[in-house]
Image (spheres, rainbow, N blue to C red):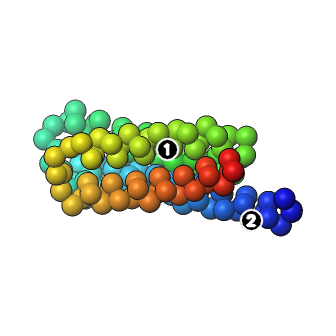
Amino acid sequence: MSLETESVREWAVRGAMLFAAAIQCLPIVGVAGRAALRRLYAVSIEDSATELLLRHRAVVLALLGVVIAVGALRPAHRSLALCVGLASKGAFLILWAKSPPLGAALARVARADVLSALALALAALVRWR
């Protein structure tokens, strides 16, 4: 494989992973509290425990986004980042698909996860091909 082809492959993997990482980090705004969580998910948050869990979810999702970004920039961490990212996306999409209709806001979250899962799958295909 030529150096030029290898360079294009590297940039494709990085770009796809950074795109997925950016989408993964979007929910961090939920850390701001109930109003932000309501805007993100269009859900009613009735108690402080649910709010805490959703705010923690925002942090965990952003941390996963950081892991994916690190994998994009550090080839030694790519395999782990791709596997964890794809597992996370797959888990949410399976749970979402098996749930009763949950509204437009969560359908938007699912579409974003499909986009980022496709980006990660593309990166994985290019990396391991």
88 or 54, nearer to the observer: 88
Kindly identify the residue that appears in the image at 54 percent across and 52 percent down.
121
Secondary structure category for the residue under label 2: helix
What amino acid is found at the position of numbered circle 1 in the picture?
A: Leu
99 or 71, nearer to the observer: 99
The label number, if any, that marks residue 8 in the structure image: 2
For residue 42, say whether it is visible.
Answer: yes
For residue 59, say whether it is visible.
Answer: no
| Residue projecting furthest to the top | 49
To which quarter of the image does residue 50 belong?
A: top left
Kindly identify the residue that appears in the image at 28 percent across and 36 percent down.
52
The quarter of the picture where the N terminus appears is bottom right
Secondary structure category for the residue under label 1: helix
What amino acid is found at the position of numbered circle 2 in the picture?
A: Val
For mark 1, does the 10 Å Cα neighbourhood hold few (<14), some (14 to 19), or many (20 or more) residues? some
Residue 42 image point, x, y percent: 20, 55
Residue 102 located left or right of residue 97: left
To which quarter of the image does residue 55 belong?
A: top left
Kindly identify the residue that appears in the image at 33 percent across and 55 percent down.
109
The label number, if any, that marks residue 7 in the structure image: none
Residue 40 image point, x, y percent: 28, 56
Whether residue 93 is situated above or below residue 80 in the rendered picture: below
Residue 85 image point, x, y percent: 51, 44
Asked whether disc 1 touches disc 2, contact meaning CB atoms under 8 Å apart, the reply is no
Q: Earlier in the sequence, mark 1 or mark 2?
A: 2
39 or 78, nearer to the observer: 78
Residue 48 image point, x, y percent: 20, 36
Tag 1 residue? 86
Kindly identify the residue that appears in the image at 83 percent across and 67 percent down.
4
Residue 103 located left or right of residue 11: left
